[in-house]
Image (cartoon, grey):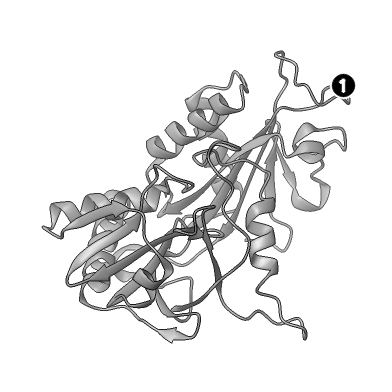
């Protein structure tokens, strides 16, 4: 990959140094946009159908009728990977409502802005290397997860202020980060999710995770982990849990598309770590990636 990667902007492949979006674009002005973070393994976009379904749900929540077909979007992603010579990569797809008159109320007629970019990541699967060097240190923060009644928890939009505020709390006076991830609770004080991750913990061999019936994003990696656990005979429970439930767990880990499964070294300074269940699910996840993308 060159020092000036190639972006896909509104149907054209352009060097990143030349890629532009209008300052009047609603994605810039209001965060009025949907996005997906994807991973390509060996040139194959992992779980593309699931990402497409969630993107459609987000656009539906925003009443954003972009008019782009699944085939068109996939072609643009494949073109971006090819233009950058990437097989194993992080991919981000964004669709904004585009440029409209400078008023808050969106117009139903949309000329969307579509931007795709990719950057290299290590190989995944059984012979892969993690993108993270160590298990994650996690700290709880005062910022609460935005309730579903205010902004749909399932919508992945450009408005990431909630997560930004949570991560900002991790910044120390000398500018360093006090932890790798910020853990947010909901308005009732129950554990919700990380700023960019879903949370799992293990107690007595059973797997627990906060329910998506609350203020929790239904992460695609999260769903895969739940499927793998159920198929492997691991007891799975989704519900509402306190911070103490997590702090006293036998194991804990975070999931997102980039990290895959990342053990939690400590929460608020209290050691937790991974373990047999975390390792088993990580192995099963790697096997699924290998089977789906490399064989």
Image location (x, y in percent) of residue 205? 17, 70
Is 159 above or below relative to 257?
above
Is 158 above or below relative to 101?
below
Residue, disc 1: 101
Left or right position of 225 against 24? left
Q: Quadrant of the N terminus?
A: bottom right
Q: Quadrant of residue 253?
A: bottom left
Q: Is any atom of residue 288 visible in this view?
A: yes
Q: Quadrant of residue 11?
A: top right
Left or right position of 130 against 167? left
**Residue at point 72% right, 13% down?**
109
Using the image as rendered, state which of residue 243 and residue 12 is in the foreground.
Answer: 243
Is 105 above or below relative to 134?
above
Using the image as rendered, state which of residue 278 and residue 183 is in the foreground.
Answer: 183
Looking at the rendered structure, the secondary structure element under dot 1 is loop
Using the image as rendered, state which of residue 246 and residue 260 is in the foreground.
Answer: 246
**Residue at point 50% right, 80% down?**
268
Image location (x, y in percent) of residue 29? 82, 38
Using the image as rendered, state which of residue 78 and residue 175 is in the foreground.
Answer: 175
**Residue at point 28% right, 49% down?**
292
Q: Is any atom of residue 261 visible in this view?
A: no
Image location (x, y in percent) of residue 58? 54, 32
Image location (x, y in percent) of residue 175? 76, 81
Q: Residue furthest front?
A: 188
Q: Residue furthest top?
A: 109
């Amino acid at each position: 990959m060159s020092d000036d990667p190639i972006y896909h902007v509104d149907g054209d492949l352009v060097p990143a140094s030349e890629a532009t979006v209008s300052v009047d674009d609603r994605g810039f002005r209001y965060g009025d946009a949907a996005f997906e973070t994807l991973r390509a393994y060996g040139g194959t976009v992992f779980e593309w159908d699931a990402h497409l379904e969630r993107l459609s749900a987000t656009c539906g929540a925003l009443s954003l009728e972009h008019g782009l077909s699944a085939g068109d979007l996939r072609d643009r992603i494949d073109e971006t990977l090819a233009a950058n010579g990437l097989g194993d990569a992080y991919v981000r797809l964004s669709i904004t409502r585009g440029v409209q008159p400078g008023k808050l109320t969106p117009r139903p007629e949309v000329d969307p802005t579509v931007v795709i970019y990719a950057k290299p990541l290590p190989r995944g699967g059984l012979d892969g290397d993690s993108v993270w060097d160590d298990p994650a240190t996690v700290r709880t923060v005062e910022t609460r997860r935005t309730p579903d009644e205010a902004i749909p928890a399932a919508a992945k939009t450009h408005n990431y202020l909630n997560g930004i505020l949570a991560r900002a709390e991790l910044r120390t006076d000398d500018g360093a980060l006090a932890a790798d991830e910020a853990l947010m609770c909901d308005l009732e004080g129950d554990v919700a999710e990380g700023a960019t991750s879903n949370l799992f913990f293990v107690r007595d061999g059973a797997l627990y995770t906060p329910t998506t019936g609350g203020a929790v994003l239904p992460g695609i990696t999260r769903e895969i982990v739940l499927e793998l656990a159920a198929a492997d005979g691991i007891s799975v429970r989704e519900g509402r849990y306190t911070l103490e439930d997590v702090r006293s767990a036998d194991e804990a880990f975070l999931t997102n598309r980039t990290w895959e499964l990342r053990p939690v070294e400590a929460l608020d300074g209290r050691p937790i770590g991974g373990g047999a269940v975390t390792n088993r699910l990580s192995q099963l996840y790697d096997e699924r990636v290998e089977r789906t993308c490399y064989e």
